[in-house]
Image (cartoon, helix red, strand yellow):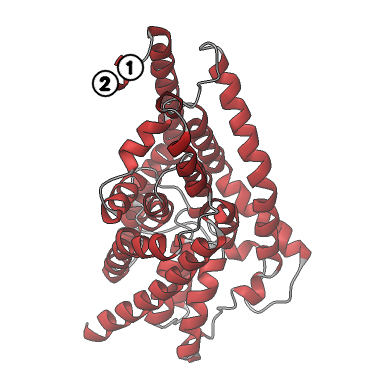
């Protein structure tokens, strides 16, 4: 940090300092408000009760197998947004801070390593304390990609947030069988720290923001690559820049996000048709669960009541294993929010990879139950 400061005049050094302090306050405040404090309280409650008191978010829409309904879509949207709005505000605030406040070359130094495996490792590691669901981590990921962070780092951060969320793993450990925790951890680590490397390699798209920003950095003078507030004449301009970035994210992401959540609620009965007759379903339902699980949207830990309900209905371990990964890891709204960032080829490959890992999770959980 000292080396970076030394190459700039004192006034610009102060802008560095104030902008980084402002981002740190936004990040710590947002995470404490939306994640760390609420999950601490919830974990204490779960430990004391050894039970999960929340109902499945899907129950707010309609029953499995029911016909599409606008009323169901509205009820699902209300329930989902009510459970998520604080985390969404925090995600948008952090995303705006990355774009408007953080020195761009710091992000590159932190998240760009000597190999793709190290890029993925750092991105996944940084995702663990954030604990965002896939939709709330999408704005932050979008901002990282736009700032030129390597694809493997950004993918690992995006998928790592919901998949390796330590709070959810702790909840699962107290209210579910140990097999669920083991499978979630094993498949999650492979997905976040391994599969994202392959997706980044084979899904690279020259039209993505990432590549455009990297190309720009190659032709810009070095001094203009350092600070995202180069055009600001003084420190007082930082709040305005931040507010503009926040509004931009909100206007470009929230409308499509709400529309897709509403539509998923409308078609919930068809898209998530798992009901009380699961004990009689065969192998096809495991494939179906792996596919539809990637499309449906849930808040953080929203997979827990779904899994508990399906288990009590007699669902096979394969179904539970598939949904254990695919429900939290990715969703249609989060894919839509990042399609123009990573490029549609990459997000499509990531979607397919989660489906495959859902099948792997189904197989692993079934095997463990068979052995025991």
- Picture quadrant where residue 357 is located: bottom left
State left or right for residue 67 relative to residue 139. right
User: 10 Å neighbourhood of mark 2: few (<14), some, or many (≥20)?
Assistant: few
Q: Nearer the viewer, residue 234 or 20?
A: 234
Instruction: Indicate whether 148 appears above or below 277.
Output: above
Q: Nearer the viewer, residue 284 or 221?
A: 221
Image disc number at residue 7: 1
Q: Residue at 48% across / 49% down in the picture?
A: 211
Question: Residue 97, image x and y in percent?
Answer: 49, 31
State left or right for residue 336 relative to residue 228. right
Q: Can see residue 308?
A: no
Q: Residue at 51% across / 49% down in the picture?
A: 138
Instruction: Indicate whether 8 appears above or below 310.
Output: above
Please give the count of numbered marks on the rendered protein: 2
Q: Nearer the viewer, residue 359 or 140?
A: 140
**Badge 2 element:** helix
Q: Can see residue 360?
A: yes
């Amino acid at each position: 940090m000292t080396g970076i400061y030394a190459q700039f005049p004192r006034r610009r050094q102060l802008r560095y300092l104030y902008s980084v302090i402002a981002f740190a306050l936004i990040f710590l405040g947002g995470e404490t408000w939306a994640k760390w404090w609420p999950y601490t309280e919830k974990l204490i409650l779960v430990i004391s009760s050894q039970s999960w008191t929340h109902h499945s978010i899907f129950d707010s829409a309609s029953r499995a197998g029911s016909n599409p309904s606008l009323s169901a879509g509205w009820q699902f949207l209300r329930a989902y947004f009510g459970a998520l709005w604080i985390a969404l505000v925090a995600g948008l605030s952090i995303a705006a801070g990355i774009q408007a406040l953080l020195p761009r070359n710091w992000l590159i130094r932190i998240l760009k390593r000597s190999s793709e495996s190290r890029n993925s490792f750092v991105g996944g590691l940084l995702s663990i304390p954030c604990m965002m669901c896939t939709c709330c981590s999408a704005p932050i990921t979008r901002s990282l990609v736009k700032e030129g962070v390597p694809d493997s780092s950004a993918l690992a951060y995006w998928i790592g947030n919901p998949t390796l969320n330590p709070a959810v793993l702790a909840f699962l450990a107290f209210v579910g069988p140990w097999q669920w925790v083991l499978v979630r951890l094993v498949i999650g680590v492979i997905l976040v720290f391994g599969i994202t490397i392959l997706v980044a390699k084979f899904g690279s798209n020259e039209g993505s923001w990432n590549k455009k920003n990297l190309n720009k950095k190659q032709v810009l003078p070095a001094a203009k690559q350092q600070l995202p507030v180069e055009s600001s004449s003084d420190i007082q301009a930082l709040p305005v820049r931040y507010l503009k970035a926040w509004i931009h994210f909100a206007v470009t992401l929230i409308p499509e996000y709400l529309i897709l959540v509403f539509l998923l609620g409308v078609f919930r009965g068809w898209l998530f048709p798992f009901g009380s007759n699961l004990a009689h379903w065969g192998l096809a339902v495991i494939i179906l669960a792996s596919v539809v699980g990637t499309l449906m949207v849930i808040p953080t830990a929203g997979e827990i009541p779904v899994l508990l309900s399906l288990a009590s209905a007699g669902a096979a371990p394969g179904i539970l294993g598939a949904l254990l990964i695919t429900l939290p890891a990715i969703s249609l709204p989060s894919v839509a929010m990042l399609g123009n960032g990573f490029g549609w080829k990459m997000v499509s490959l990531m979607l397919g990879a989660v489906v495959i890992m859902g099948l792997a999770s189904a197989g692993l959980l079934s095997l463990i139950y068979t052995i025991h």
